[in-house]
Image (cartoon, rainbow, N blue to C red):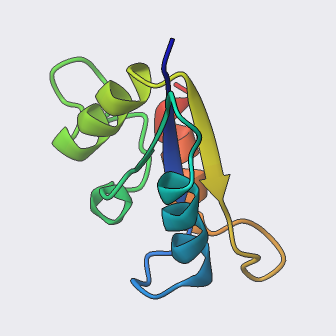
Amino acid sequence: MSVRILALVGSLRAGSHNRQLAEAAAKHAPEGVEVELYEGLADLPFYNEDIDVEGSVPAAAAELRAVAGGSDAFLLFSPEYNGTMPAVLKNAIDWLSR
């Protein structure tokens, strides 16, 4: 049995420590475990319930939901950002939780 884990990195910066940790998790995942780093968080619009209706969901949000739907688990890499989680990660959670 294989396990698919979707990694969401809360820092958009290419050289961030959180991205490096996610890449290490993917590289060192045990046999039977695939860790996929999701690359589209920067493309997600801010969550807006008015556009989250069938036929109007932005392509980036639909793609995230499709990839997430094929995953067995999520692995969140979140830097501390002004005392809370970064907006890009919270926004992804908003799109996925509805």
Residue 5 image offset from top left, x and y in percent: 52, 35
Residue drawn at 72 percent across, 79 percent down: 81
Reply above or below: 83 against 23: below
Q: Nearer the viewer, residue 65 or 46?
A: 65
Residue drawn at 38 percent across, 51 percent down: 38
Residue extending farthest to the front is: 31
User: Is 89 left, or right, of 34 in this rendering?
Assistant: right
Q: Which of 18 and 80 is in front in this view?
A: 18
Residue extending farthest to the top is: 1
Q: Quadrant of residue 79?
A: bottom right
Residue drawn at 76 percent across, 76 percent down: 80
Residue 58 image offset from top left, x and y in percent: 21, 40
Q: Nearer the viewer, residue 88 or 29?
A: 29
Reply above or below: 97 against 46: above
Tag count: 0
Reply above or below: 37 against 65: below
Residue 65 image offset from top left, x and y in percent: 36, 29
Residue 70 image offset from top left, x and y in percent: 38, 21
Reply above or below: 78 against 92: below
Residue drawn at 61 percent across, 69 percent down: 21
User: Is 34 left, or right, of 59 in this rendering?
Assistant: right
Residue extending farthest to the bottom is: 15
